[in-house]
Image: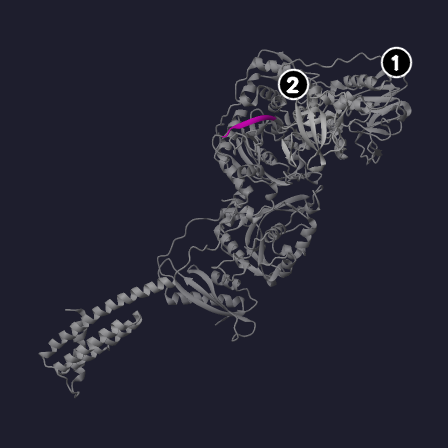
Amino acid sequence: MKISLQWLNDFVDIKEYLERPDQLANLLTTTGLEVEEIHSLLQQYKFVKTALILEKDKHPDADKLSLCKVTTGEGVIHQIVCGAKNHKAQDKVILALPGAILPGNMTIKNSVIRGVASEGMLCSYKELGLADTSDGIAILPENTPVGIPFADYAGLNDVTLELKVTPNRADCLSHLGLAREVSCLLNRPFKKPSLKELSPSNAPIDFQVQVLNPEMCPRYTGRIIRNVKVGPSPSWLKKRLESVGLNSINNVVDVTNYVMMEWGQPLHAFDLRHIQGGVIRVGKATPQEKFMTLDGTELTLRGDELMIQDSHRSLCMAGVIGGKNSGVQEDTQDIFLESAFFAPQFARRSARNHGLSTDSGYRFSRGVDPNVTLEGLERATQLIHECAGGLIGSKTFEVKSHEISPVVIPIDPEIISQRLGYSVDVPKFESWMIRLGCQVEKTETIYKIKPPSWRFDIEMDMDLVEEYARLNGYDHIPETLPPLNKVPTKHDTHYSFRSRLVDIMTSLGYCQALNFAFVSEKKQTQLIGHRDLFTKTGLSISSQPVKLVNPLNEQLNIMRSTLSLGLLDNLHHNVHHSIDAGRLFEIGSVFEYNSNNSAYIEKTRWAGVAWGWPINLWTKDLNVPVVMDLKQSIETTLRFLGFKDWQWHNSQEIGGLPHFLHPGQSVVLQLDGKNLGFLGTLHPSLKETMKIRWDAALFEFDTSSLLQTNSISSKMTPISKFQAVDRDLSLLMPQELGAGLVQSQIQQSGGPHLKTVIPIDLYLGENLEKGQKSITYRLCFQSLEGTLTDDQIQKIMDNILLNIKKHWEIQVR
Amino acid sequence: MPYFLHDVTHELVRDLQRMIGIDCCPMSLKELEEQLAQIQSEAQSSFSQASSSSALYDQKVFFLGKNGTLTEIMKKMAGLTKEERPLFGKKVNEVKSALENVYSQCEDSLKQIELEQQLQKEELDLTLPSWPRELGHPHPIHKVTEEIFQILARLGYSLRTGPLIEKDHYNFEALNIPQDHPARDMQDTFFIDGNHVLRTHTSPIQIHSLEQETPPLRIIGTGAVFRCDSDISHLPHFHQIEGMCVDKKVSMADLKGTISFFVQEFFGPGLKTRFRPSFFPFTEPSAEVDCSCPICKGAGCSLCKNSGWIEIGGAGLINPKVFHAAHIPYPEWQGFAFGFGVERMAIIKYGIPDIRLFPENDLRFLRQFKK
């Protein structure tokens, strides 16, 4: 909200702050009203003066430039190079001297233009920020005095503050309100404008006001003014409105805006000839009713809006916006002026439901002083009478349903000391309360405080604690550490797990990605393809994604069901910024909707993407597929988390995998018989669409089964002192059989002495039967009790063979 | 007696036994001595001419081996007299020992040459870089969250999380932000349906904690939050971390002391903490928290816009209405709460110029944040 200091000065003496507005701004900021910006015309037009052109010559070296001798009085002559054409000798002009900083941060300096010194700039209104277009430099009237500051000449000596008013301080949304606050802060008298006695006409009035919903409109006042002359506002009024960023419309509307900015009371003026039936009714809208606002937008009403109506139709959305059918026009003669108190929650609801943001709606929804309704009407009547003439109606309509009175708050000053952590100065507290406008009653130990009507935000003792704290200064609050009275509790296990996963993955060389939790529905649907194929991997997706009611745009319109989409975007971004090899992982939530119990489910996923290898002299012959590197990292992680018996199943076993994966280079991870998700090489056609030259692979797993890691025992197992013995086992098996499954079977049937099984050779040669492959595993045996004999090992080997032959058609080679 | 002589005598005995009954032409001592001298000189010259340690070893086997020339000549001792045999045997041993010496000298010098050749051959240009194999990097948001959490954990705070899709009640109502209250305008909300929103702050975590746990409480809530606001300085999905302390007597001074401890641990010693009055529906009194600018230490710079202060978050004493909503008896239990924007903390601490770098996940950005 914009505050004009000149205007503020009408109600509290702050003249000295016009020169030092930063001091006032600082005072307001440190007591709770943050000043975001100070705009000082005085500062802006420092070094800008009225001047007289003494001589105008051609620039010796440029046809389009002129060389002027300009005086700012007292024999001071400045040589100025000027590019404009509309000036001549003896013209009165505006001169910006070196040191001036014009709008747009244009700094004026002594300069040399085409070899000729120029000691300033003759300004156009555009360059001064006072006009949008320019026809050349500004030529001032002949009688303009020379050498006076331009700000003084133009009356632009105001300073405005941009105030960030928090929702609790609605009382400061006007100049009077802020003046009251400043008078409290500075302990200076508050000069409330005295309302002049009105001189109403005697003409009888046949008009009625009815309030049908008093809970929504506890107070309604109005007055008829006849024979007003609608026209332009006087310049003082225009200037005041402009200083706070409002455009002048006509004298009647301007007065309503003026009173709003001055008293904080929004008003509305109706054209009396459009009020049918001689009645104003304040009541709820009819559902589906059409209403056209004064700016021409047609709204369909819900039925819970409070409307100002006549005998037939709605004229105005109460406290929010006027209707097109009844506003003041150029030819309006008689008006009905309204000043009311609408209950904040209803005004806010109407404004919000229709997306309307108006100065009036803003104030009513935060709350206006209920005691200022009538005063606002009086002030506006008086100003309309002054600016637009007219006959003031003999009757003041006033409907007042109930008193709105602040509650009395009992407070023991001791509570202030306890809650602030330093001793309260009781007399100071009392005086602050009085300066705030409270009624203060003192009993033996406690005070009874009744806040003023405009401070309806003060409802309880803690509000008074805050008032004391802020007025006394937050800097008085000391710094202490509270004693710890309880043994600290455990951290959230999900967070600890995720944190551990981040540690492991970063140790493995992966960088952590964090993507938005919302994605494009279209892109996600495209990526996932067949939902069944995706869910078969163990990653669940609800049939309908979780949609946002009000997304920022179509690119971010649903909550994600997979992390892969974001990671593929990251892959795309990185390779297209020439990062030819990379490893990324993400741990984040995906979202599901369960329509059975109407619940939203969030699951934590662990996903990653890898592409390329670092190209280097030492690694040029390294020929490992990227998906294997990814697999290595996953298995290392699983081992580190304490898992042992997981399995990988290929596409055939699962019965198809998502279409973005290479069907021959993708697997599903299984732990304790449960599918957790997929790992695979990116499908070549997707790679081509994404224009990625490098080998790339990705994985995504559900983490719910991995969370149990916290319960896995971490007790140490004994280490054998005896020799380990290796045995190689070459097996012939069908080519499509996953050799990893055979390996797990070997491991499982090997008993406690089989320490490791490592595949060391894969052979797909000519002298094998078609469709067969030969795999050699190296088995390492070791016992805690002694060195294993050949007989012992052979027994175990026999058992292993028996076992795997039970499962598959496998021959020893 | 040298060890090898044992072998020789044993062999001799065996040879003699074998030779009984075999008719041969015995050589005289003189002849044998001449032959021995010749072997010695031949061996010496072939040892010194050997071009490699393996060729040298072959020569050693030829002259000194089990079936080498020296062994052969020993066999011929049979034709000598009883008196001559020890004399000749001694001579053979002397020659053998001399040749062994020559051998080890030659071997030493050849090994030396060969080692040098090997070293030369195995030379690597270690001025060349190795291949890049780096540790990965946590996302700066995670890193900053962890740092803040670790500092507060030392004061006894425990970490909590909560759902990102929240009921209206937890995100607003229970935090004293009723329907149709202007405070709702302070947070541009993404709606999921009539009763669910994407949480606009991490404060709902406080409510869950108040409902589920028994005071005293020291809780950190952290995670993603959402507001429908996107421009050069706002992301629609960003992160917060906040602390809550509930105990019998809790004051603004306790709050300020806690934040001051945090500020000095996180940004550096000596930095000051400043409170400014503000408004949050869930705290009363409320404060904006500033700390002296970590870059210029309060002297004024572009980061703090020459004010010497940087706004880092909001704080206050928990509003009694929040306790009432969570059915915690007030003023028996009191509390304070404070919160920071994680992105903002990262921007201040690491001088990140553009908030849009966070969700981009560009490796050139991520690789700058060490664990």
Write down the region rendered in magenta. B271-277
**Horizontally, is A714 left or right of A41 in the view?**
left
| Farthest front residue in view | A60
Disc 2 from disc 1: Cα separation: 39 Å
Residue B278 x %, y %: 61, 27
**Residue A178 on the magenta span:** no
Residue A61 x %, y %: 68, 37
Q: Which residue appears at 49% of the width and 27% of the height?
A: A481
- In the image shown, does A801 or A759 lie closer to the viewer? A759
**Horizontally, is B103 left or right of A148 in the view?**
left
Residue that label 1 marks: A201
Residue A229 x %, y %: 87, 21
Image quarter hosting the N terminus of chain A: top right
Q: Amino acid at mark 2?
A: Val
Residue that label 2 marks: A182
Q: Chain of mark 1?
A: A
- In the image shown, does A465 or A361 lie closer to the viewer? A361
